[in-house]
Image (spheres, coloured by chain):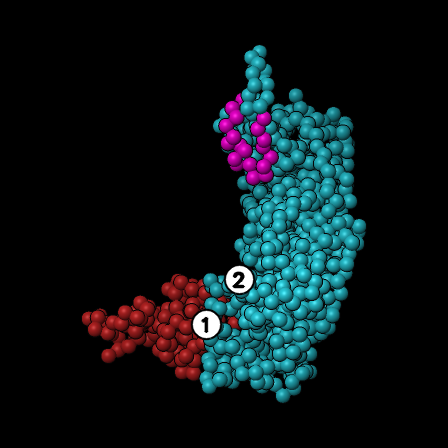
Chain colours: A red, B cyan
Amino acid sequence: MSLNTKIDTETIERISGVNTRKCMKCGKCSATCPAFHEMDFHPHQFVAMVEKGDIEPLMKSKSIWNCLTCFACVQRCPRDVEPAKLVEAIRQAVIRQAGENHLKAEQIPEMLDSELPQQAIVSAFRKYKK
Amino acid sequence: MQKIGVFVCWCGSNIAATVDVAAVAEAVKGEPGVVFATDYQYMCSEGGQSLIKETIKEQGLTGVVICSCSPRMHEATFRKTVEAAGINPYMLEIANIREQCSWIHKNKEEGTEKAIILAKAAVAKLNLNTPLIAGESRVVKRALVIGGGIAGIQTALDIAEAGYEVDIVEKQPTIGGKMTQIDKTFPTLDCAACILTPKMVDAAQSEKINIYSYSEVEKVSGFVGNFSVTIKKKPRYVNSDLCTGCGACMEKCPSKKTPNEFNMGLDNRTAIYIPFAQAIPKVPVIDTAACLHFKTGKCGICQKTCSANAIDFDQKEELITKEYGAIVVATGFNPLKPTKFDEYQYNQCADVVTSLEFERLMNAAGPTKGVLLRPSDQSHPKKIVFVQCVGSRGQSCRDHSYCSKICCMYTAKHAMLVRDKYPDTDVTVFYIDVRTPGKNFDEFYRRAVEEYGVHYIKGMVGKVEQVDGSLKVQASDLLSNDQMVLDADMVVLATAVEPDPTAKSLATMLTASIDTNNFFTEAHPKLRPVESPTAGVYLSGVCQGPKDIPETVAQGSACAAKVIGLLAKDKLLSNPCVAHSDELLCNGCSTCANVCAYGAIDYVDKEVNDHGKREVRHIAVVNEAVCQGCGACTVTCPSGAMDLKGFANRQIMAEVDAICK
C-alpha cells in the first residue's frame, strides 16, 4: 500500500493542536534538541514546513523515527509552539495509514515507567515494532 | 419642549461606507423634539462646525445630537462648537456610530439600523438634558515626581526651569536610577556617568527642586490641581544636615559582607554605605539588617568615628504630607532576573551574567575597576557568548510578551567594547532578530559586525553546560541549518526590561491604569503619550514602556511641558457631571460613602422640610470638586436618592427605552 502524502497544514495542526504561526523563528527547539544530528529535518524545520504545507518530505523523513519525544523543545520554546507535538502528528499521519500498531497493546503494561510522560508512552507504542 | 438638531457625520468613508448616513438623518426627523436633521462629510472640520453653529442660530436649537466618532475623540470639540453658538455645552449628545457601529459591522443594512437606534437613543436622552455649569477649582503650583532616575530628573529640571516647585521622591538612598550603573551609552559611546551626574547636581542645586531620597509615597488623595500626598521618609540613621559625606564611617564599619546592590552583588559593601561616589545626596544610610549595632547592640564604631556627630541610631520614620497640583510617575524598570531559565545555568554558574552585571564588570567604578575579569576565577575571558531576548518576546510563563527594545543595542555596544578593549577576545552574539531603529543605531550595529568582527549568529541558545571550569554553549545556527557547540568563558544574558515592582501598588494609589505587563497606560497611545487617563497624573520614562535614554529624556521633557501647562493655569474647570443627593430621599445609610473611591461623600446633620414636616436628618452631601462622576454611588443607593448630573437615571432609562422600542 502506497503512502498518501496529500495531507495539509490544517490536518497536521488539528491532530497536534499546534498553531505554527506562533513561531518567531528563533531556533531554540533545534538548539536544544539532543537528536539534532540524527535528523534529516530538524525541529524548527518541522514548524516552518508544516506552516508552508510542505508535509510530504516530513512524512518520508528519518526524523519522525529519530525524535526522542524528550520534549526539550516543548519545554524551552519561548512561544509555546510545541514542535514535538508536530513530529508526533506527522508520525501518526504515517502510522494511521499503515493500518496497524507496531507494538501490541498487551505488551505495554510490563514496559511502563511512572516517570515517563503519557505522550512518550503513546508515541513509543506507535513507533516501534518488536 | 427641546428643539433638537441632529447632525450625522460620514467621517469620510469611515462611517459612510457601512452606514447609510442620509437614511439615519431621515429616520430621526420624526423623533420628539427633532426639528432639523442632516448629514455632512466631516462634522469636525471647520465647515462642519460652521454648519452646526449656523443651524443653531437659524433654527433656534436648544440641543444638538452629533452622530459621529466616540465622545472620547471629539466631545470636547463639539461642546466648544455649540457653546460658541450660545447653547450650554451639556446640551450636546454624541451618538457613537463609528467605533461602536461602522467599524465593527460589515453589512450596511445592519450598520444603518444600529446607527438609527443609537441616534434615537441620544435624542431621547437629550430631551431630558438640563444645562450644567462647570465649577472651578484651584491649582496648587507644585509638582511631585515619583522616581529620581534620568526620566524623573529631566522632568523635574524642566518644570523647575519654568519656575515651579518640584519635589522628587526616590526610594533608593540616591537619585540617578539605573543610568548610574551603566558604563557607556549607545550609539555614541559617551560615558553615562559623565552626562548623568551633572544633571543630578543640577537637580540637587536647583532652588525649586526638593529631593526626598530614601523615601516612598505612602498615600495619595485629592484630584487634578489639588493632590494631597503623604511621603514616608525612611530613617537613614544619619542626620543629613550634619553629615559632611566624608566617608570615615564606611571605612571603619566592621560589617563588610553585604552584597553591594549597586554592583549587582558582584562585590560587598559595608552596613553603613553610600551607594557610589557621586551619589546625591552624599549621605550614607545604615542597613539595619547588616549593622552590628542594630543586630547585637554592641557596635557603634561609626558613631564614635563621625566627627560631625551625624550618626543617629534613634532616627524614626517620618511622614510628610504636602499638596501638589500634578503628579509625575517616573518609576522606571528593573532587569529581569533569569532564575527560571535553567537552561542558561544562571543560578549555578558565576560566569553566566546578565547584561547589567556585565555593565558593572566593564565599568571603571565597578568591582573590577573596569578590567574585564570573569567572576568565578578573576581570569580574562577569551571567548564570550551573548544571548539576546532572554525573557522578552515569549508566550510561556517565564517570558514577557513584549520586545524590551534596548537589548539589541546594548548587546552590540558590549560586543564592540569588548573587541575594542581586548582584541584577542572572540565575541559571538546569538540573535532572533536584530532591531535597531533609531538615529545612527543600525550603523552602530553594522560597525560591531564589520569593523569589530563580532560574530552574529541567527539562532537561539538551547543550553549552557559547565564542563571543567569552562562553559559549553549549544545553539542553533539557523542560516546554516546546523546545531553548534561553542566553548565560552563567559555567557551574557540580555534580560528583559520589567516595570518596577512598585508600579502596581502606586497605580492603585493614583487610580491610574496599568496594562497586563504592569506598564502604566497612557491616555491615548498616539496622541496623549505622556498623560495617564487620570487627570493630573503624567508619565515619564520606562514606567510607560521600554525606552532607551534619548527617548526617555525626550518623554521626560514632554511630560514636563504638560505639567507646566497645567501649573500655569490659575483655575481648573471641573466636570459638572457629578453626583448629588436628594435630601428628601436620603436615609443616611452610608452605603454610597462606602463605595466612593474618591472620598467625595460626607454626611451632615441638616434640617430638611419634608412636605411641611421640619426635622434634622443625617444625610449625604457630595463634594463636587472631588467627585469624578463614576456613578458607583448612584447604582448603590438603596433609596434612589443619589443621581448623576448629565447621566440621571431617567436619562439612562430613556435611552434604554429608545433602544428597545
Element at label 1: helix
Q: Residues within 10 Å of mark 1 (few under 14, many from 20)?
A: few
> Residue shown at 62%/42% (left/top)?
B221
Element at label 2: loop
Q: Amino acid at mark 1?
A: Asp
> Considering depth in this image, is B652 or A62 the residue closer to the camera?
B652
Residue B144 within the segment the image draws in magenta: no
Q: Is residue B631 visible?
A: yes
Q: Is residue B486 above or below residue B184?
A: below
Q: Position of residue A110 (x, y in %)?
A: 21, 73
Q: Position of residue B550 (x, y in %)?
A: 71, 64
Q: Is residue B17 above or below residue B191?
A: above
Q: Which mark is residue B297?
A: 2
Q: CA distance from mark 1 to mark 2?
A: 42 Å
Q: Is residue B243 above or below residue B33?
A: below
> Residue shown at 49%/84% (left/top)?
B469
Q: Which residue is mark 1?
A: B342
Q: Which residues are magenta?
A: B585-604
* Marks 1,2: beta carbons within 8 A: no
Q: Amino acid at mark 2?
A: Gly
Marked residue nearer the N-terminal end (1 or 2): 2
Q: Is residue A65 above or below residue B649?
A: below
> Which residue occupies the extreme left position in the image?
A106
Q: Residues within 10 Å of mark 2 (few under 14, many from 20)?
A: few
A113 to the left or right of B187: left
Q: Tell me which chain the residue with mark 2 is part of.
A: B
Q: Position of residue B206 (x, y in %)?
A: 77, 56
